Image: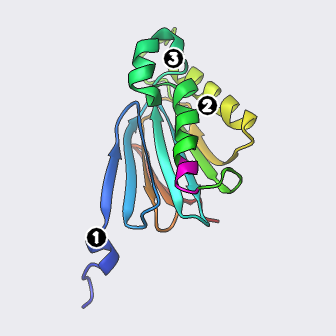
Amino acid sequence: MAGSPGISSLFAQRVIIGVGDMAVSNNAHVVLSTYALGSCVGVIAYDPLGKVGGILHLMLPESKISPEKALAQPAMFADTGLPRFFAALLGLKGERRRLRLFVAGGASVIAGQDPFRIGERNSGVTMDYLRQQGCLVRFTDVGGSINRTVHLEMATGTVTLKRPADTQQLSLAD
């Protein structure tokens, strides 16, 4: 029947990743989503052969500002969250050499001058780590002064990037 949902959409499950959290999956019926990437950075990873992917929504660049918080919530910080994120992807049989990445966020959303430059620092630390690890960053959408929302479809590796003025789809499967 035209207009009826397909069988896969009937069983689709949306997993919401909050600020300072992460999720990984190898379930084709899952869509991972994170909202309101302002100064936070979202790292979206996908292994097209293993159909393994995930999203990390990190909030701060360095855990040294709160070691106790880093122990309780390592995904909150770039320096503790990124290693944990990649370990989780590899634990689901994702392979680092096949991972394709999209990095979004790192904006300056505070009105006026931001003396802490959190968004800039978040993206800088993240990109430095990814370069050091030899990771393939396929797409970036960082900086500026806007929030972003990101969805990753596990079945296809399609990323939907929503900004206030537009929506864009990118493929991490190609």
Res. 11 mark: 1
- Give left or right: position of 90 versus 163: right
Query: What stretch of residues is rendered in magenta?
Result: 89-93
Q: Earlier in the sequence, mark 2 or mark 1?
A: 1
Is residue 130 magenta-colored? no
- SS state under label 3: helix
Which residue is nearer to you in this view: 73 or 174? 73
Q: Amino acid at mark 1?
A: Phe
Q: Position of residue 92 (x, y in %)?
A: 52, 55
Outermost residue, bottom side: 1
How are the residues colored?
rainbow
Residue 3 in which image quadrant: bottom left
- Marks 1/3 in contact by CB < 8 Å: the verdict is no
Above or below, 72 against 3 in this view is above
Above or below, 83 against 13 in this view is above
Res. 52 mark: none
Q: Position of residue 157 (x, y in %)?
A: 52, 62
Residue hosting label 3: 63
Residue hosting label 2: 126
Compute the Cα span from label 2 to label 1: 34 Å
- Which residue is located at x 33 percent, y 51 percent? 15
Q: Position of residue 72 (x, y in %)?
A: 38, 23
Few, some or many residues within 10 Å of mark 1 (<14, 14–19, 20+): few
Q: Earlier in the sequence, mark 1 or mark 3?
A: 1
Q: Is residue 110 visible?
A: no
Which residue is nearer to you in this view: 164 or 147? 147
- Marks 2/1 in contact by CB < 8 Å: the verdict is no
- SS state under label 2: helix
Residue 93 in which image quadrant: bottom right
Name the front one of labels 2 and 1.
1
Q: Amino acid at mark 3?
A: Ser
Q: Quadrant of the N terminus?
A: bottom left
